[in-house]
Image (cartoon, grey):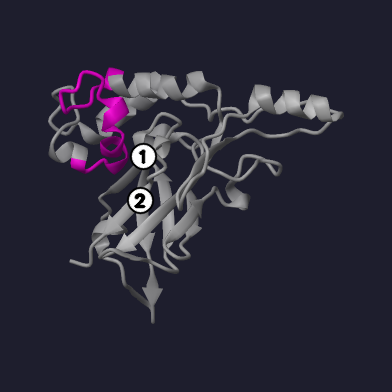
Amino acid sequence: MSRLNHASFFRHWTVAVPTTGAVGAGLLAALAGCSGGPSRVQPPSISPSGAASEAMTAYDKDSDGFIAGPELDAAPGLKAAMATLDLDKDGKVSEDEISQRIEAWQATGLGIMSITCRVTMDGKPVDGATVTFEPEPFLGENVKAGEGTTSGGMASIRIPKENRPSADYPPGMQFGLFKVKVSKQANGKETIPAKYNTETTLGQQVSSDDPAIMSQLIKFDLTSK
């Protein structure tokens, strides 16, 4: 493949968010090789209406047609995405809003994103912690969990190789709504409070229009109390 053809390929298939400072995010596309031509990592298959219905079944405990208040607290992935999810800005999430959010991810045609997050505890970087992004169950089995280990407080979150949809799948994360868990073991004991792992209140939307990703400030500022 000529140099010109490579340049043309990347202009057509790759969108990037510049990385500055400690935290950055970029959108990735797959490269198939010159003989087979370019291919693109497709978004995971999700039924917007089906996933939205399942979300309401899981979290709308009072059956009023909205996920709000304590119900929203129980869904960190949804709560973290309110800036783009709550279209009418009423502080509640409806079935239609969830469906439209999934449709918005799919409309980008982008299947994977590289993300880096920063973790601090009481203002200090956390080293050696495992950061796990667990997809909200209502998204289905095609959206995969990702993880990374902090160094200097920073962690690149990726789907583990053994869980990627195919052997040539590039590193990164699929679009989605995720519960985020931060864990660090020392002498067989968890050193991070339960509110950040087994009872996590942390969440993150992986999407090109998510404010935290756009501003390159994906950070989890934990407290020991």
Q: In the image, is 54 to the left or to the right of 150?
A: left
Residue 212, label in figure: 1
Q: Residues within 10 Å of mark 2 (few under 14, many from 20)?
A: some
Badge 2 marks a residue whose secondary structure is strand
* Residue at 22 percent of width and 26 percent of height: 93
The secondary structure type at the circle numbered 1 is helix
Question: In the rendered image, which quarter contains the N terminus?
Answer: top right
Q: Amino acid at mark 2?
A: Lys
Q: CA distance from mark 2 to mark 1?
A: 8 Å
Q: Nearer the viewer, residue 127 or 138?
A: 127
For the residue carrying disc 1, how many other residues have a C-alpha within 10 Å: few (<14), some (14-19), or many (20+)?
A: some
- In this rendering, the count of numbered labels is 2
Q: Is residue 225 above or below residue 143?
A: below
Q: Where's residue 100, x and y in %?
A: 36, 18
Q: Residue at position x 62%, y 51% from top?
A: 161
Q: Quadrant of the C terminus?
A: bottom left
In contact (CB < 8 Å): disc 2 and disc 1: yes
- Residue occupying the point 26% across, 31% down: 82
List x then y, in percent, for residue 110.
55, 27
The magenta stretch is 73-96
Rendering coords of residue 201 (x, y %): 25, 50
Direction from residue 214 to residue 80 in the image, left or right: left
Does residue 39 appear anywhere in the picture? no
Above or below: residue 31 compared with residue 180: above
Residue 33: in sight, yes or no? yes
Quarter of the rendering containing residue 8 = top right
Q: Is residue 151 above or below residue 104?
A: below
Q: Which mark is residue 219?
A: 2
